[in-house]
Image (cartoon, rainbow, N blue to C red):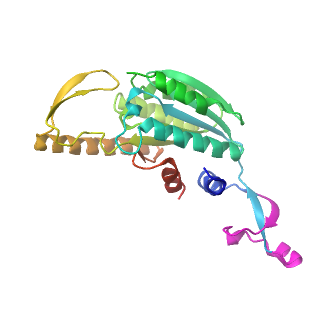
Amino acid sequence: MTLWTKNVLSKLYRKFFYPSGILLADAREYVAGDDTRLINWNITAKTNALSVNNICADSGNDIIFALDVSASMKFGTKKQPKISLATDILKTLSQLSEKNNDRVGCLMFSNGVEKYFPPRRRAQCFPYAIDKIVHCQEKLRTDLLAALKFLNKVLTKRSRVILICDTFALTAGRKAILAQLHILQSKHDAMMFPMVDGNDMLVAQLGRITVEDSETGEIFEIDTDDVEMMSRVEAQYAAYQNLIFKDVESVGIKIFPINTQNSAMEFLFKLFK
């Protein structure tokens, strides 16, 4: 990430996460690209140099990333697997969080809590522990419910919680998950980044094939030449995905899907817009 990109993303990060509650600090010389609404005309008139108010976000909050590291996150048919894109986004956001003086923490979970790093300032080691944990995962399921119960127990201070998980993480025990999400949102500011891939449901005509569930190890046979059946499955999956997203949004949590066809930078610029 270039210095220019990092500075631009840092400004967009502040604007996205801190839309209000900014504090005026000292003034500085105008730089191309600065918001003209921040021009300090009094200082400009006195110094004959265009100056702007230097602002700093009312930061210092706790940012908690909850990352799904189960086997299903290794799936990806576009530019990269879901887990690779998710970790790129997490690492970039953690850098931006620290740059804005936020305390950063991370929970990695699969069928249980794998590792938890409490929120701290700087010198975070969790981005480098992710790869080690991910490569050890084989056929571990996603237990989002266990992760949410853990967060609701350990987070005593109001925090910003970012859930990065596979879309299918919300399928098992949806009612119980929604109840825990409601509790989380009532105490904290939560948002969800579900990972999606264009081929989450296989639609290509490959004949009769054998498929293995990456999390359960279950093996079953599918006739992909049955166009009617595959179209029905695809439609049912799309409808169920929309239902899941609506359920999550119903408890006040905003959803920002991450598609594996995009890069981390593409997603973040789109998110901050």
221 within the magenta span: no
Residue found 49% across the figure and 56% down from its top = 270
Task: Using residue 262 as the reference point, say whether residue 273 is left or right of it.
Answer: right
Residue 134: x, y in percent? 48, 27
Task: Using residue 178 as the reference point, say whether residue 114 is left or right of it.
Answer: right
Residue found 61% across the figure and 52% down from its top = 13
Residue 151: x, y in percent? 55, 28
Vertical comparison of 11 with 238: above or below: below
Residue found 65% across the figure and 30% down from its top = 125
Task: Using residue 39 as the reference point, say whether residue 239 is left or right of it.
Answer: left
Q: Which residues are magenta?
A: 23-49
Residue 235: x, y in percent? 22, 45
Q: Quadrant of residue 239?
A: top left
Residue 192: x, y in percent? 47, 42
Asked if one can make out residue 256 in the rendered structure from this viewpoint, the answer is yes
Please state the total of marks drawn on the protein image. 0
Q: Which of these two is toward me, 163 or 138?
A: 138
Q: Which of these two is toward me, 131 or 58?
A: 131
25 within the magenta span: yes
Vertical comparison of 15 with 167: above or below: below
Asked if one can make out residue 149 in the rendered structure from this viewpoint, the answer is no
